[in-house]
Amino acid sequence: MNEGLKDLRQSLHRIAELSGEESDTASKMKDALEACDPTLLVEGLGGHGLAAQFDSGKPGARVLLRCDMDALPIDEGQTLKHASKNRGVSHKCGHDGHMAMMVGLAESLKDRPLESGAAILLFQPAEETGEGARKVLDDPQFEALRPDLALALHNLPGFPEGHIVWREGLFALASVGLEAKLQGASSHAAEPEAARSPARALAGIIQEFDDLSDPGAIERGGGILTVIHARLGTRAFGTTPGDAAIMATLRSGTKEALEELKRKALESIARHAKSDRLDFESEWVEFFPQTHNDSDLLKEALNACRESGLPLVRAESPFRWSEDFGHFCEAMPGALFGIGAGEDHPPLHHPDYDFPDLVLETGVDFLEAALRRLVDQREGSGT
């Protein structure tokens, strides 16, 4: 095991920061990247993001390799010597490990520079809220980087440790959050008939949302609709409630299917609100596009794995979670891969999850092998 990368990963775990607040993490990454002598280092990209460019100065593809920086609002569920110092915030998705692997790649590029093309190592903020990738792409500083291709690697519990997980086409679903408020009028609890209570409407909406969800039909254009929060009135036993709120996450494999699910969800809210004489308002938040792997890029990366002797495992179905790396896949040919964290490893976003340090070196090996093949195999804009 590379003890240096392990120590770096665990030090990043200690300073876990939420989406959009990654200032200490960015500072630590800046120090690590400067030690690797990149040809260009861009700071403040899309927020607290950084990009380190390693340019050969010779023609070839310009390959963006992306890792994420932010942590989650989850308490540590186990005792760790490298536990987060920020109460209620921890790296329960493994972004600390993703950053450490990318630094390992930067160290390799310092020791063995590219002979063609360029590598752009992106440390992206705010992945968990779906905002970071879009902000990076919209940042005027991104224009100077001009990537031709994009590649990312995410650890995946439930798969054999150190195996590279791949899938052609759809890799991860699109998703969006829905926030809706219902407004009626309250009354004394002894006179419920005098109120316009949203209780019945809220119950009907929750039931219909459940009926709209069809996890088994993802690849046939269906979707998943999950109610994540619902509130009716306040804790006041003398009052018939006059307001309610509901929040849900909608997921599907295509833009068209997601738009149809959104339409049906709003239709349900509007119908129930009208039936009970309620006003309502809604807002869409935290949009993640689907992540669709480019076939040519996927083929080259898989060939690099085989040539390097890296173990492979194919994911039989698209992953139901979402990744804002999908924004990069819409902007340029891109591919997202996984690296197995262990078949019995605690799942992502679980309080007991911790990134498995044993896969750090394998992750670096994959990123480097794929990068070196892509800059050689794909003709890019060069310099």
Image (cartoon, helix red, strand yellow):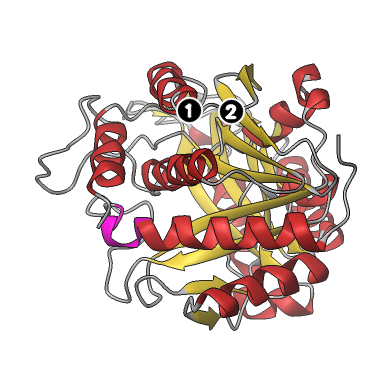
Question: Bounds of the magenta span?
Answer: 355-360
Magenta residue check for 265: no
Q: Where is residue 311 in the image (x, y as percent from the top left)?
A: 47, 80
Tell which tag, 2 or 1, sits nearer the viewer: 2
Residue 271, placed above or below residue 164? above
Q: Position of residue 212 (x, y in %)?
A: 68, 66
Which residue corresponds to mark 1? 33
Q: Where is residue 233 in the image (x, y as percent from the top left)?
A: 45, 30
Q: Which of 197 and 121 is in front in this view?
A: 121
Magenta segment, prevailing SS (helix, strand or loop):
helix
Q: In this image, 233 relative to 264: left or right?
A: left
Rendered residue at 53%/24% (across/down): 186
Rendered residue at 48%/28% (across/down): 33
Residue 173, placed above or below residue 164? above
Which residue corresponds to mark 2? 38
Rendered residue at 60%/30% (across/down): 52
Label pair 2/1, CB-CB below 8 angstroms: yes
